């Protein structure tokens, strides 16, 4: 490779604004491509704001974390909120940056906002909308479809209708 090109790339990579803008751009493209074709326009705009705001993550970590949280929560208003890898990476990067760059109080508030945004996003989701994980409600595939797995805990299995 041409040494002049290598020098320019190293210079660009040493500039945090260039790195963050490139990262935000890459995550924006990834998330937009991963969104379902039938996604409403406002979900696409919210996703773009979620990923695009990362361009300012080092300069303004707390505002970026709250913006990401608000946009993620807004997408939770759809009947089936989008679940794309670009969005997850944006939330993780916002969480890391606010934790790494802010004082404890602001970091805790930023992480709390992100947590609230995630809960609001997943509240109506068909994939994550109900509590899962206890052995009493665990499900496993069987030859006749999905059936309740045997419980090994002392907690009785739920008996009412599932919602």
Image: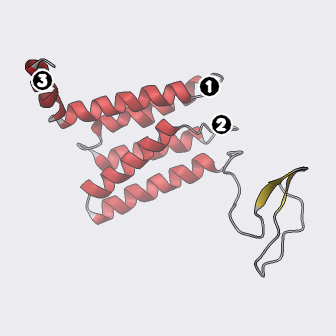
Sequence-wise first label, 2 or 3: 3
Q: Is residue 8 left or right of residue 45?
A: left
Sequence-wise first label, 1 or 3: 3
Sequence-wise first label, 1 or 2: 1
Q: CA distance from mark 1 to mark 2?
A: 9 Å
What residue does disc 2 label? 78
Q: Quadrant of the C terminus?
A: bottom right
Disc 3 packing (10 Å; few <14; some 14–19; many ≥20) = few
Q: Is residue 64 left or right of residue 19?
A: right
Helix, strand or loop at disc 1? loop
Helix, strand or loop at disc 3? helix
Q: Residue at x 51, y 39 (%)?
A: 85
User: Residue 8, which numbered label?
Assistant: 3
Q: Residue at x 44, y 46 (%)?
A: 91
Looking at the picture, how far across and down is residue 104, in whole percent? 29, 65
What residue does disc 1 label? 40
Q: Which residue is at the front of the view, 13 or 161?
A: 13
Looking at the picture, how far across and down is residue 66, in whole percent? 40, 47
The extreme bottom residue here reads 154
Instruction: Determine whether label 1 and label 3 are within 8 Å by CB.
Output: no
Instruction: Determine whether label 1 and label 2 are within 8 Å by CB.
Output: yes
Q: CA distance from mark 1 to mark 3?
A: 40 Å
């Amino acid at each position: 490779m041409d040494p002049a090109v290598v020098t320019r790339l190293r210079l660009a990579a040493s500039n945090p604004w260039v790195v963050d803008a490139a990262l935000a751009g890459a995550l924006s493209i990834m998330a937009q491509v991963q969104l379902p074709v039938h996604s409403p326009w406002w979900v696409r705009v919210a996703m773009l704001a979620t990923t695009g705001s990362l361009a300012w993550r080092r300069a303004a970590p707390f505002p970026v974390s709250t913006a990401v949280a608000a946009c993620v929560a807004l997408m939770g208003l759809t009947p089936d909120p989008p679940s794309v890898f670009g969005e997850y990476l944006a939330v993780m990067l916002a969480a890391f940056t606010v934790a790494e760059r802010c004082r404890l109080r602001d970091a805790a508030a930023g992480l709390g906002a992100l947590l609230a945004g995630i809960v609001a996003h997943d509240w109506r989701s068909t994939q994550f909308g109900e509590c899962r994980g206890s052995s009493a409600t665990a499900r496993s595939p069987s030859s006749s479809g999905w059936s309740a797995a045997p419980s090994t805990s002392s907690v009785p299995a739920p008996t009412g209708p599932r919602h």
